[in-house]
Amino acid sequence: MEILAIISLCIVYWIIGMGGFVYWWTKELDLTTKNVPLFIVAGVLGPGSWIIGYLIHGRNDYKTKIIFKKR
């Protein structure tokens, strides 16, 4: 019975990671078949993919700063 619980937790962990990847990736980009390796890695990262996705796609403050003004 406990092996079934461990397998279930692993599946849930992987699904959470894939869900985070899809959520954050599709904020800016289309999900294509060439993104499948990233999709699998995000599943392995589990809830960490939500944090990494937020750091990459969630913050907009770094995109709006002007470094050099045009002349």
Image: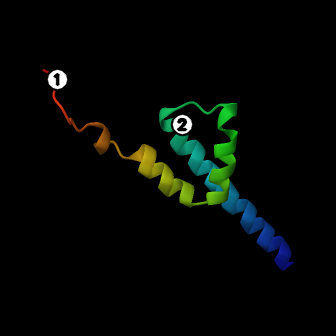
Q: Quadrant of the C terminus?
A: top left
Residue 62 shown left or right of residue 39 in the figure: left
Q: Nearer the viewer, mark 1 or mark 2?
A: 1
Residue 14, image x, y percentages: 69, 57
Residue 5, image x, y percentages: 79, 73
Q: Quadrant of the N terminus?
A: bottom right
Q: CA distance from mark 1 to mark 2?
A: 31 Å
Residue 57 shown left or right of residue 7 in the figure: left
Residue 35, image x, y percentages: 65, 37
Disc 1: CA contacts within 10 A as few (<14), some (14-19) or many (>=20): few
Q: Residue at x 30, y 43 (%)?
A: 62
For label 1, the residue is 70
User: What number is the disc on residue 26?
Assistant: 2
User: Which residue appears farthest toward the left when viewing the image?
Assistant: 71
Tally of marks: 2
Q: Which amino acid is tagged 2?
A: Thr
Residue 32 shown left or right of residue 51 in the figure: right
Answer with mark 1 or mark 2, whichever residue precedes in sequence: 2
Which element type, helix, strand or loop, lies under badge 2? Answer: helix
Disc 2: CA contacts within 10 A as few (<14), some (14-19) or many (>=20): few
